[in-house]
Image (cartoon, rainbow, N blue to C red):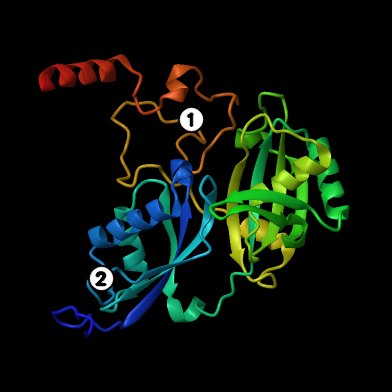
Amino acid sequence: MPRPQPGGPPPAVIVQRLAIRYAKRSRMRFASHRDVARAIERGVRKAGLPVAYSAGFSPHPRISYSGGAPTGAASEAEYLEIALTRRCDPAEAGLRLDAALPDGIDVIDVAEADAVSAMRLDASEWEVTWPGVTPAAAEAAVRAFLDAPVAEVERLTSRGTRRLDARAAVARLEAGAVPAVSGHGTGPAGACALLRMIVRHMTPAVRPDDVLAALGQASGITPSSPPLMTRLWQGPLDDVPPAARAERGRPQGPEQPTDKAQCLPAEGAAPAPAGQGRADHQLPRGAPGQLTGRRAREPYGRDCPDARNRATEQTVRIA
């Protein structure tokens, strides 16, 4: 018996492909790849881009993603490719898509896919803030890690526990102190180290947290709170000189506001302090200026008196 075929007209012909580089910042670092993909699909529809769809009973927008960052990590170099049924100006399409995306997902660059389709994503550069670890201890752990021929770690996956060689994936690893102007310089233990690493894309993939686990096994270091990981760049290893890789992924120009609507402060309101309100601004737990207490644990108002009163009123109304 032949399989049933979907009715209706065939899907539209693809006439243009756009390669988009976007950033995942702020609280969006905790969004999974599937959540980010859903947000981007909604943004494409909201922006009115003529996206192409696949054939079949369940058509999907033709959007492909390359080398997505793991959940919990921020990134300044995420890539996707979108197929369009009508030619659009890349710059205009980028502006429309950026305005339609939620805060924390920002479009950085848009170009014709033919110009970047040959680019190899061989490695990524990561910046890791290691709270509660002194720079001297981090440098000693880095030296021990680089001198070791093998650094195996275990990771729990959906298929069970897997052993990975973190040393084979690291092309470069450096340790230093967090600059005081970044707001990360003081943690609960009075210290905070900064790691810069270039990790090769391998199968199975080795993530920055695997490298941190190997560093902890070699030196016995235990951070005071979870580290903050940010991808600055990804591409071929021979793309740019090593000294320039650190600056390539950083946002250029003025600091981007967290509100896509570009809301202005009310007339007569005091301006926000410098550095406050950045989309990628984050602090380790216990750092100066960070919220503490119940408000920090419940940032969405789940524990505020008004929320409890509203929930009680709804319960009484339903009863």
Residue 206 seen in the figure: yes
The amino acid sitting under disc 1 is Pro
Q: Nearer the viewer, residue 145 or 111?
A: 145
Q: Which residue is disc 1 drawn over?
A: 273
| 65 or 9: nearer the viewer | 9
Classify residue 20 as left or right of residue 176. Answer: left
Q: Which mark is residue 59?
A: 2
Q: With respect to residue 137, does 123 lie above or below?
A: below
> What element does badge 1 sit on?
loop
**How many numbered callouts?**
2
The percent position of residue 147, horizontal first and vertical second, equals 88, 54
Amino acid type, label 2 = Pro
Q: Residue at x 60, y 33 (%)?
A: 183
* Residue located 34% across and 72% down the image: 62
Alpha-carbon span between mark 2 and mark 1? 47 Å
Q: Which residue is most to the front?
A: 1
Residue 118, image quadrant: bottom right
Check the picture and name the quadrant holding the N terminus.
Answer: bottom left
Residue 147 vs 136, above or below: the answer is: below
Q: Residues within 10 Å of mark 2 (few under 14, many from 20)?
A: few
Q: Residue at x 33, y 18 (%)?
A: 304
Q: From the viewer's perspective, is 268 left or right of 210?
A: left
Q: Is residue 73 above or below residue 265?
A: below
**Residue 140 rendering spot, x and y as whole percentages:** 85, 42
Question: In the picture, residue 55 is in which quadrant?
Answer: bottom left
Q: Identify which residue, 105 or 145, lies in the foreground.
A: 145
Residue 38 to residue 310: above or below? below
Q: In which quadrant is the C terminus drawn?
A: top left
Crowd class of label 1 (few under 14; some 14 to 19; many from 20; radius 10 Å): few
Find numbered disc 2 in the image and state the secondary structure of the residue it sits on: loop
Q: Position of residue 101 (x, y in %)?
A: 33, 53
Q: Is residue 50 left or right of residue 273?
A: left
